[in-house]
Structure formats: C-alpha cells, structure tokens
Amino acid sequence: MTSYRRPTFLLQSLHSCITQDYRPLEIDISDDSPNDECEQIVRSVTLPEGISLRYWRNSPSLKQTGNVNKLFSMARGSKLVLLHDDDALMPGAITALLAAFSWSPSVIASYGLQYIIRSDGEISMSESEKHDVYVHRTRDLTGLQQDPVVSALWLQFPNNGYLVDTALARATGYLGEELVGDACDADFGIRLALANRNSQFAFIDRHTSLYRLTASSLRTNHGCCWKLFDLVSRLTDLTPRQMDARDVLLRRTAEESVVDNAIHRRRKRALEIFRSPFYPVSKLRPKPLYHLVLMAFPGLVGLRELFLEKPKSESPALATLATTE
C-alpha cells in the first residue's frame, strides 16, 4: 500500500486488508507523508493472527513512482496486490484473485470488477457499471484473456487492486513522471503485457476492489494523457487486434491530450493531435474551437466548462488513468 497524508482513507484501506480471509498475509505500507498522522494510524491497528505488517515512512518523499517501486522491491511474497491508500479491497478478494491463477500456468495477473466510490465514500452503482463497461470488464469477457496487450490497451487491467506475480511486477516497475506523466498505472499494465505477450491475464466476474474518485484532484490534473498518448502512438510490432485496441485508447485520450499539451505550451504537438484521425472533430460542437483557442492562450483553461467541456471528474478516460499519491 502506498500512503500520503490521508489517514482516514488509509485506515479504511488497511481495515479492508486485515479482514481478508487469506493466510498468511503480509501488508507492506510505504508512506510519503511529511507528518506522522498515517504512522500513528498504522501503529494503532491490532493485527489478527496470520497477518504481519511492515511500515516505512520515507524522508525525503519518494513520490508515486519511487514509492511503488520500493514496495515492489521489498515484497517477500511470490504474488502481490498493489493498493492506493484511498482505495480498498472487497471481502475475500485475495482468495478469489489467487484462485484465478489455477486456471492456467500462463496466468501472470488477475483482477475483478471495481466499485466506484465517490469522495464521500458512497458507492455509485451507475458509475461503477459505466466504468466497467468502458474498460471491457463485462461478464461475457470473464475468464482467461488470450491477449494481455489488448486487455491492457483497453485499460481492462486496473490501476490497482490486481494480483500479480511479484518478480514480473518488479521487473516491469513504474516509470517516472518525466516519461509517462501521471498515467503510470496504465503504463505499467501496458508494459507488463508487452513484456509477457505469451502469458495471460485472468478476469473474474466479481467485485474485488473499491476505486475512489476524488473530483478536486482530477479537475486540476493536466498530466494524465499527453505523454501516454505519445508512448502508445509509437507502439510497433502489434497484431491487427492489438492495433485496433491501441487506436481505441488513442481516440479516448486525444481530446485530453490536446488540452494537456496546450497547458504545457506544446502547441505544435497539440495541433498535430488535433489534426490527427484520433481527434473527434465535429462542427456541431464548440469544443474544437475552444481547444484551438487554448493552444494560443493556455490561461483560458478555466473557461472549459463554458465550452461544454465535460468536467474531468466525469471523464471515463481520465478517471481510469489518473491517480495521485
């Protein structure tokens, strides 16, 4: 578990771990908080039999990439679950995810459905169902995923709450913000799949985790799509089905990539994406005009809702890609 200045959320996430029925279980927490509030929460928890806990507070902060890579390197089990401190596991999740590894010796990771919870902790069934459909986690796709690259490009592989082979997670690792921006979770899944093309992901038709949307952080985030868009667009040696999945991801992130590039004053790249076949230009919408204006005047980003921009907290692509420490 990664942790950063969210003691209340951390307690909820930690509780979801210690109530798992799988034994033995080891919980590792790497905390980037500048104070000891989260540490006090961790130290106050009574662990049931069969569960151990290791805690580190990082000084200086490792940031998201360093924090996750530290946990990958320190993990002692043959398989691990990554969990952010504002998300949580459903009861019995680890047992269910581990059972999916028995489906085939080629399984390297398993995952299930995610409940979307709002910042107030309430589950949104409508958003949960919409989100799972958006990332191709639907009942008809239950089972072994024959092409992990397609699954990762669909964003079917979740941002956390998955069970993965520890050695492969460690070998793949997280890339830094300078390479992938804030889309490090999505990038991890894609690179894990590309490095293990002959392996399989296992998707189970069961809710295994809770994924919290924090609207305030999403609305101010302009680092989720632009670098990932460029990385995905440069992928080569893909099968026709993989290219189709790649193009779906590029179409889903093109608009936000234009905004991101414009905000970072990369006008030429913003215009290239705007003119690409992945950008959904429509003369019936004011949004393309707004994006052109934004390339020239990045400071006008605050006016996006006046141009009928969907709030970022409601953007499926951004909600799927964006995680903040």
Image (cartoon, rainbow, N blue to C red):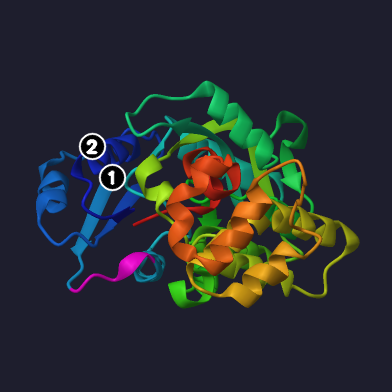
Q: Residue 175: tell me if it is visible.
A: yes
The total number of labels drawn is 2
Specify the farthest residue to the right.
240
Mark 1 near mark 2, Cβ–Cβ under 8 Å?
Answer: yes
Q: Residues within 10 Å of mark 2 (few under 14, many from 20)?
A: few
Identify the residue under disc 2: 48
The answer to whether residue 309 is magenta is no
Position in image of residue 219 (x %, y %):
42, 48
Secondary structure beneath label 2:
loop
Q: Residue at x 40, y 41 (%)?
A: 215
Q: Residue at x 31, y 51 (%)?
A: 27
Placement of the C terminus among the 4 image quadrants: bottom left
The amino acid at mark 1 is Ile
Which is the main secondary structure of the residues drawn in magenta? Answer: loop
Identify the residue under disc 1: 51
Q: Residue at x 21, y 52 (%)?
A: 5
Taking the image as shown, residue 57 lies to the left or right of residue 130, namely left
Residue nearest the observer in this picture, 265 or 229: 265
Q: Residue 49: tell me if it is visible.
A: no
Position in image of residue 135 (x %, y %):
66, 43
Residue 23 placement: quadrant? top left
CA gap between label 1 and label 2 equals 6 Å
Q: Which mark is residue 64?
A: none
- Looking at the rendering, the stretch of residues picked out in magenta corresponds to 60-64
Q: Is residue 254 above or below residue 92?
A: below
The answer to whether residue 62 is magenta is yes
